[in-house]
Image: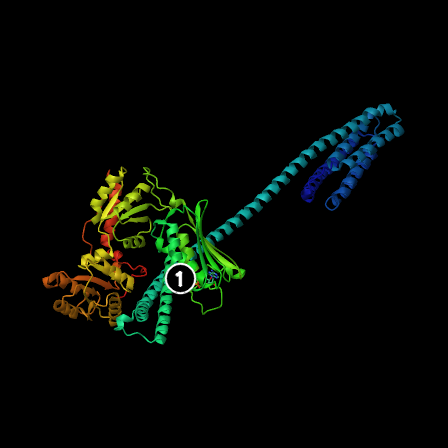
Amino acid sequence: MAEAPLPRVYDAEIRAALDDLVRESLRTLLTVAVVLAWLWLTQVIITDRPYLIWAYVVLATLVVAGAISYRLCHQRLGLAVGVYLAGLTVAVTVIACALRGAAVSYLYLLIVLVAAVLADQRAMWSVTGVCIALAVTVGTRVHHMSVSDLFPMALCVLLAALTAWLGSRRLFTALSWALSMTEQARKSAQEARERRAEVRSMLKSLDEAYVRLERANEALIFAREAAEKAYRFKAEFVANVSHELRTPLNLIVGFSEMMATAPESYRGKRLPSEYRGDVMAIYHSARHLSDLIDDVLDLSQIEAGRLPITREPTELGGIVREAVDIIRGLAEAKGLRLELDLAPGLPTLRLDRTRIRQVLLNLLSNATRFTDHGWIRVRARIHGHEVRVTVEDSGRGIAPDKLAQAFEAFGQLDDDRTRQGSGLGLAVSRRFVELHGGRMWIESTLGQGTTVGFALPLDEAKAPAPLLRIREAPSRDGRPRVLVLHDDPQVLTLLRRYVESVSFVLADTAQHAAELLRETLPFAVILDSTWVERWQRIVAEVGVTEPLPTLTCPLPSLRQLALLLGAADYLVKPVRREALLQALARLPNPPRSVLIVDDDPSFARLMVRILKAHDPTINLLLASGGAEGLAIARSERPDLVLLDLLMPEVTGYDFLEEVRRDPALAGMGVIILSARSLEQEARPLAGELRLERPGGLTPTEALEAIRALLEVLTQPAAASRATVAAPAAGPSG
Ligand code: ADP
């Protein structure tokens, strides 16, 4: 049997399969050889040939070799084949000896062919060699034939061997190819199986990851909701607590201020100086506490994204100068040199004047507090696309390791707790600057001084274009800009609190409205009902040709609410001295006699002090309830009533109703002082709501507008939904 290089994996099984084939062939050939020998013997017997004995020998040889070979073929196939080939060779040699003639030697050909079938190549070539040698030996020695007579036979045997070798070689090459292909296919199948397993496990992992992701997502949503809720609670808590704290605190501030600064309101009796010092300390501490509450509230409002900034064209140099002037006295009292270095041509920026002044005052008061000698320098310069304002001092500086915490809330960097300061100033200031699209930084060297600076972008200050014909809907923060025309800037705070999807800008004069319109066309205009005529004039003056949607409606404002209730003004408690004095100044005539109607005697007393300090000659009357108030009003006919709204029995509303009804009370001015904010007012605003757009609305827009309006009407609670109170507009009555 020819041996071809077999793939190793298959070695054993292929060899076993081939051995089986050989075994089968061997059995057939054994039988055939014995049958042929027996037939020959029969023919020899029948024809009565002289070499009968040789025929027996041949048959016996083949039978014996066959039997041995048969026995061995299971355990030792190689030996079995060897025995059979040997037996065959002996039998053929016996025949060749017995029969004369060259043709007989061709029987060796048979052995070669059998060897080609049963043995490997080397064995086949050995058998071929042995057969030729035996044929030649028997031919020359036994039958005395010449070598040339035997040559064709030898050639035939060689050729047969060669042909068998070539045939089996091709066979084995093809077999080896087939096997290597099978092996490759098997490997590929194995790889595919492995890949499939990998893919399956990946799919499983993916499924698990997806499930985990979904769970994480759910947890995240839950956490976000919880965080939002907590945040809302926190903001509401802060607002409510601040409000509750502020009310009594305001009384403390008001009274201590009056006691320390306006002795005239105590019938000219001055406090002994020791008391005055203590009362002054109470006043300063209470102011400090009150500022602290404002800061906390501002911070929580900023964090909740609720603190609106009201931008208006502001000359930056102007507010820097203003702030420096406020702090100058303080600095000079400490012997500090205060230098102001403003670059010429500082622009007019659109800023929230109050907030930026607050930032400057913060920086300047810090510089004054933390500098014991030397100087404070305030600089403003234009750098590229921004204006930078810096407050530099020669004070004690901040240690490098503490510097990073300077902007953190409650980040007081020294352990000197006796110093005034909340640790909120820089945190709040930075938030204010950021609300303007700017940034803030701090640099300091311990023992040498500190520089705190902020930069505001110049883009806002660009010279206003004549009139942009392109509708520039989005504002800087990407929200559509809506122009609000109203006399009371407070309305903006309310609108911003309720509508977050647009950016509101307010114009409280026709000139300001025209300026804003020339600068950039808004997405829409909301005008108070009282502005309709003024708006038409503005449109004609500016020459607006765009189909600008306008929403005309009575907009809620405290002053309007006051008018609606039949009063001249409306102040939300706690009422600061300045606010009250400003409201008095807005009256057509300064009042000579004032009736205070309030069930809170402390608050009433504070009002008395403020009014007395303002005008010692003023005639003051007090009533602790609505009924008493009405009686005094009828008998004394005061010029002005300061009226609380929420009182037991006869309320402020009842009082106002009576004033409206009773001609005897006509002509009396009323200023409402109430803790009740505008949003808590359930009284409807008179007037119609009108939406107009030149060119009209598409059917979808009209339907959407109807839907939105109906939603408001069918959910009246939405109008009074709880919101975080603004600093001066908290609940509780
Ligand atoms: P505070 O109300 O306590 O001043 P700030 O937020 O304004 O709070 O300042 C935080 C801390 O930063 C201060 O307590 C102080 O330690 C430090 N700091 C701020 N400005 C200066 C400065 N100009 N010089 C030295 N330290 C300063």
Work out whether 526 lies above or below 694. below
Q: Judge the density around disc 1: few (<14), some (14-19), many (≥20) Cα neighbours within 10 Å.
A: few
Q: Classify the position of the N terminus by image quarter.
A: top right
Q: Position of residue 10 (x, y in %)?
A: 67, 42
Given residues 271 and 239, the one toward you in this image is 271
Residue under circle 1?
329
Q: Position of residue 251 (x, y in %)?
A: 30, 69
Please count the marks in the image: 1
Quarter of the image for residue 7 reads: top right
Q: Would residue 540 appear left or right of 467 to someone viewing this image?
A: left
Given residues 328 and 487, the one toward you in this image is 328
Q: Could you tell me which secondary element the residue under label 1 belongs to?
A: helix
Quarter of the image for residue 533 reads: top left
Q: Classify the position of the C terminus by image quarter.
A: bottom left
> In percent of the image, x 25 and y 50: which residue is there?
486
Instruction: Name the residue type under label 1.
Output: Gly
Q: Would residue 263 appear left or right of 225 to someone viewing this image?
A: left
Q: Position of residue 645 (x, y in %)?
A: 21, 65
Q: Position of residue 562 (x, y in %)?
A: 21, 58
> In percent of the image, x 53 and y 50: which residue is there?
201
Given residues 305 and 91, the one toward you in this image is 305
